[in-house]
Image (tube, rainbow, N blue to C red):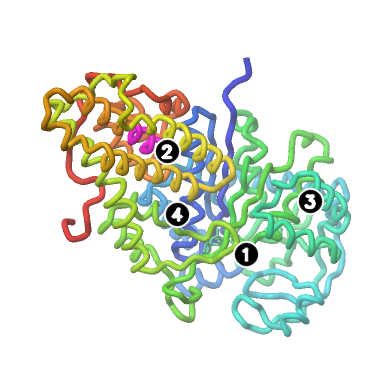
Amino acid sequence: MPGPRRFYVTTPIYYVNDRPHIGHLYTTTLADVLARHHRHLGEETFFLTGTDEHAAKVVDSAAERGLSPEEWAARNAAEFQRAFARFGISNDDFIRTSEARHVERVTRYVAALLESGDVYSGDYEGWYDPGQEEYVPEGRAREWEYRSPVNGRPLVRRRERNYFFRLSAWRDALLDLIDARPDFVLPEARRNEVVGRLREGLLDVPISRCHEEAEPRWGIPMPGDPSHVIYVWIDALFNYLSAVDTEERRPFWPPSVHLIAKDILWFHAVIWPAMLLALRGCPGFDWVELPERVYAHSFWISEGQKMSKSLGNFVDLERLEGYASRFGLDALRFFLVTQGPLGTHDADFAEARFRHVYTAELANTLGNCANRVAHMTRRYLAGRAAAPEASCPAAAGLEEAAARAVEEAFRALEALAPDRACGAALELARAVNAAIEETRPFALARDPERRGEVGTILYRCAEALRIAALLLAPVMPERMAELLRRFGAAEAAERIRARERGDLRAWCRWGGLAPGTPLETGPALFPREEDA
Ligand code: MSP
């Protein structure tokens, strides 16, 4: 019998020089939602995030503070780790590129590429963007009027003796790959962008820098030539492989999805797969398959404006912490996931919007619905789920609505659309509210003859809500685990809280709520702002 399916999800590893902000938290939360969903499904799941530490600017910022690069990097990496723990991120590992396990493996990968001729030494002269630490092809440099599109500073002309990766050799293979696997680069508009640029042609890329430029030496030495260090981007991309390149973890390879934003698409959709194709041809690396998907979302902006250092308007951790303590961490996660820049449009982080979503979706729809069902069950049924009467037509449509929601949510999560999965679950909660309005159990309850009907209606409502809670659990693990606990699904609640593998398909089956189970009331799951 084949073992459980495996799911391996990654985030970019973040520059250790920056302070964590909404952009970092967003991608990491999306990865977290996918990881949790796949764990709930019972799959072997591996969720990787971490920090990218060998950028040259780390040396300068460390020096400005009188620290060594190691100390500065360690301090900031710890900051990312603390932030992710605080925001409920369930990563299975956190890789730092300065760790020996990474350095040792990258050295091995690059040595293999040198050996095979995929990496060679040569001279290079071109336009260089110091802020991004990358060379820009002539055509682009001209188009950008010789300024960095990121920070507006001039590009500089630079010449160096370097090690190059033979990227140009992989153009056709990459075009074929993207053609054969339409899911490889997502969303579709991003795939078209990549294809367009590939058709323009590919240059070989320098993958080392002379280390005298950055004293003290910071980076992974080029194998066989300690006067060079491996270019930070090459070093960084290999994190996805190095982290799982152990006896025990190798079965997780290849990644099911690399989540990134559009800013680093080229590296992930072109340079990375080309490096892997090259490595795969080296002895001992034939197991190195290509990742299944690269998904590039768009950008958060803040109150209608692009976030930038000069404007100082990053939605930073303090601000996010403020929302989490006022509305609850799960509400913040729900907002990020449902209102964020999935797809190709940027999204605005605006307080008014947050309030609106919180009140309409969480307090008035989901929270209110759970509250009503639990309270009516207490009042009319002594707090226990009744045995539903199959012949009773009232609220019978909820069973089918729940089945539809499950199917839609599962499909959406497979398609990397957790926003749509939330939409399906909320739709189900709205169907419960509508069923209550329509069947009026609170009115029927006055007639002792109709208790059976009331029991049936409330059973169906509770069952639909229990299922909605399961679908929302990857996004709002704490609140949904609490709802599940109150609605008689203690085991699922426990496993969700503990981040353990579950049995989501079975949990979502209609009828999981056993008649006679006590349903608990409790404090509002999403208190209205004025009550909070
Ligand atoms: N270190 C490189 C990545 C190496 S991966 C092998 C890097 N780091 S970064 O710190 O700049 O992080 C970039 C990533 O942060 C983006 O791809 C995205 O995941 C996230 N975001 C940064 N700003 C963002 C927004 N304004 N909005 C959404 N996400 C963005 O690049």
Question: Is the C-beta separation of discs 1 and 4 under 8 Å?
Answer: no
Q: CA–CA distance between discs 3 and 4?
A: 34 Å
Asked whether the residues under the numbered discs 3 and 1 touch, taking CB atoms below 8 Å apart as contact, a structural biologist would say no
Mark linked to residue 471 = 2
Q: Main secondary structure of the magenta part?
A: helix
Q: Earlier in the sequence, mark 2 or mark 4?
A: 4
The residue type indicated by label 1 comes to: Asp
Which residue sits furthest top? 1
Residue drawn at 43 percent across, 54 percent down:
78
Residue 163 sits inside the magenta stretch: no
Indicate if the residue with disc 4 has its beta carbon within 8 Å of ligand 1.
no
Which quadrant would the N terminus be assigned to in this image?
top right
Q: Is residue 267 above or below residue 242?
A: below
Which residue is more in the foreground, 326 or 73?
A: 326
- The residue beneath circle 4 is 338
Numbered disc in front, either 1 or 4: 4
Ligand 1 under 8 Å from disc 1 Cβ: yes
For the residues marked 2 and 3, what is the alpha-carbon distance in whole angstroms?
37 Å
On residue 263, the disc is 1
Pointer 1 or 2: first along the chain? 1
Give the residue number, with chain letter if any, for mark 3.
274
